[in-house]
Image: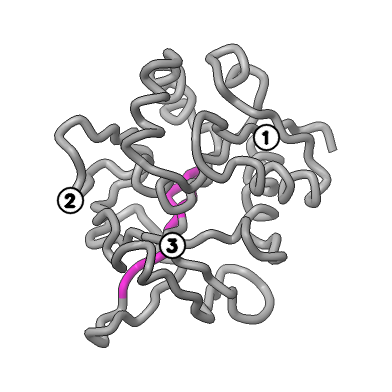
Amino acid sequence: MTARIGVLAVQGDFREHARMLADCGVEPVLVRTPEHLGQVAGLIIPGGESTTIGMLIRRNDLEAPLRDALAGGMPVFGTCAGMILLADEVLDGRSDQLSLGAIDMTVRRNAFGRQVDSFEAAVEVPALTGPAITAVFIRAPWVERVGAGVEILATVTDDDHTDRIVAVRQGNALATSFHPEVTQDKRFHTLLVDMVLEDS
């Protein structure tokens, strides 16, 4: 397999994603500069602190190259903070919140609560073969609105017995509010690899 997939490595849990890509047989590239981005055929935007990641994207002159790559159809997978960054609208964000607009959705930051409210849940993802995903939610967002072109991949029921959208796909852009990289389940990362190979 020759595809090289990048992991945005300015802040957050990028090392765990790199490990998962290696486990999928892909060479991971830690992306910190526009030059690094130019070396990859796909990208993961990891969990972390979305405003800090956005600030470092701008500081590292990555915003315009990222927008160009995503607009050009580069396959991308965002988890937690990465989901927030891929949205075209963010609720409860800061005024300088970076939104890359790769997915037609509205995301609410920290929707499931603070760090102490972190939890695990068995989440059915019909698009992935096999049993339910063990989804780890850490200060997680949820999706409040999706556009007509967005496929809802998974939902979870919150404390108010409301089904909340926690995984979506629009074309070559994939996002989850949970952290598959902290489990042993490689199915979401394999899906990204398949998207990259189909795109090449």
Mark 3 lies on residue: 138
Where residue 185 appears, as percent x and y from the top left, is 69, 66
Under mark 3, the amino acid is Ile
Q: Residue at x 41, y 24 (%)?
A: 57
SS at circle 3: loop
Q: Residue 147: x and y, percent?
A: 26, 54
- Report the residue marked by disc 2: 92
Q: Secondary structure at mark 2?
A: loop
Of mark 3 and mark 1, the one earlier in the sequence is 1
Question: Which residue corresponds to mark 1?
Answer: 5
Residue occupying the far front of the picture: 116
Between circles 3 and 1, the one closer to the viewer is 3
Quadrant of the image occupied by residue 161: bottom left
Q: Residues within 10 Å of mark 2 (few under 14, many from 20)?
A: few
Residue at (62, 60) in percent of width and height:
182
Regarding residue 147, the answer to whether it shows in the image is no
